[in-house]
Image (tube, rainbow, N blue to C red):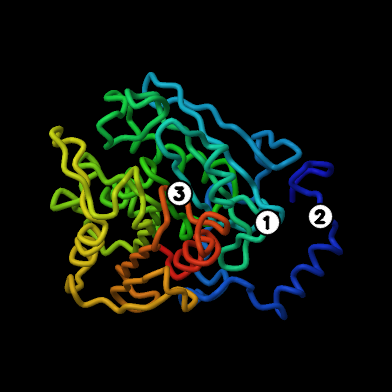
Amino acid sequence: MCAQGSPLCRRSAAGLILAGLLSVFIADARPAFGAPSPLNVRASKSPGCGNATSWKFDDDDHHTRNTTVGSDDRQYLIHLPEDYDEDSPSPVVLSFHGVGSSPESLEAASQLSEPRQRLADKGIIAVYPLGMDGTGGGASWEGAPYEDPDAKDIKFVNLILDELGDNLCVDTSRMYASGFSNGGGFTHLLACTPSVNTRVAAFGMASGAYYPGTHPGEACQPDRKVPVVITHGDDDPVVHFNGEMSDDSDRELPSISNFSKNWAERDGHEREDYEFSLLNDDEDVHVWKWGKDGEEGQVRRLRVVGMDHTWPAVGRAPFNLTEEVLLPFFEQYTL
């Protein structure tokens, strides 16, 4: 167990027992977006399980990890859930910020570190990597025309997964990736990359910028059927829903509908063979779904009427992406 007095061990034994009993009787308040997976049936323990971590977490359960990829200094922010237990594996969600932004900004926007966010009845280890400064006005990710050309971001992601598993108790069957804007485009590139998608069970993109360098078309060769959920506002002034042509071919963007159909085809579905529905019966949130809940290679596309360039949350959109869509979608998939 964790060390007495550590911020990881603030709950009393009685509190943990009560929380366990309540979880049996109280249903998850999140709207259902797919069939839940059996609790912990496929939990896979990482090498870090059973050991006290040497990483120092602050009173808010955050740790900033500094590491290196080749000759580059890299950094990522980690948040541990309240119920973290070094003997019981926790799911992991990586989330990648937009260009010029930061891990802290995406943590606030996505709300992935909030205690209410759970997967398979466990709190989430939320991880927010920091990109490298490119030519676009700040930190960015591989695949964008403004990336640092020397960035080794895919290697960075694999290193993060290695370090998390070695230093924390991680459920290696339940690791997921998400991203916003430039980070959404990079998340797509990760979904196309077998060295990552064989470790990450499912992927979610919000207002993603799918430049040619992220392989939005035939260049994407994932080598497996990858579950993806794609969310975009049709009033996005930054990454246009209907795509964008450019004199610079590296900056062309696909229409979100065609981009989603590409994923459907890639995952073995007919492009036009999708099921249409409204999220929560809301006329402003149009869902296209290819494949059944929990089926290998399910694809979902959410078109949010009137939404601009944002991570959807109440106040910015008619729904909360993280708890109403993203996590229920992720919960259906393990590796």
Residue at position x 47%, y 78% from top?
A: 281
Label 1 SS: loop
Question: Which residue is nearer to you in this view: 269 or 313?
Answer: 313
Circle 3 sits on which residue?
310
Task: Name the residue tied to disc 1.
Answer: 115
In the picture of the structure, the residue carrying the numbered disc 2 is 11
Q: Nearer the viewer, residue 97 or 125?
A: 97
Contact between labelled residues 2 and 3, with CB atoms less than 8 Å apart: no
| Distance CA(mark 3)–CA(mark 2) | 35 Å
Name the residue at the top extreme: 71
> Which numbered tag is attached to residue 42?
none
**Along the line of sight, which residue is nearer the eye, 26 or 249?**
249
SS at circle 2: loop
Tell me the amino acid under the disc marked 1.
Answer: Pro
Residue at figure coordinates x 34%, y 79% from the top left: 292
Q: Residue at x 77, y 75 (%)?
A: 21
Structural crowding at the residue carrying mark 3, measured as other residues with C-alpha within 10 Å and reported as few (<14), some (14–19) or many (≥20): many
* Quadrant of the rendered image containing residue 257: bottom left
Which image quarter: residue 118? bottom right
Q: Amino acid at mark 2?
A: Arg
Q: Check disc 3 and give the amino acid type.
A: Thr
Tag 3, which secondary structure?
A: loop
- The relative height of residue 281 versus residue 191 in the rendered view (above or below) is below
Q: Residue at x 49, y 67 (%)?
A: 331
Horizontally, is 150 left or right of 1 in the view? left
- Say whether residue 235 is left or right of residue 73: left
- Residue 255 placed where, x, y %? 22, 55
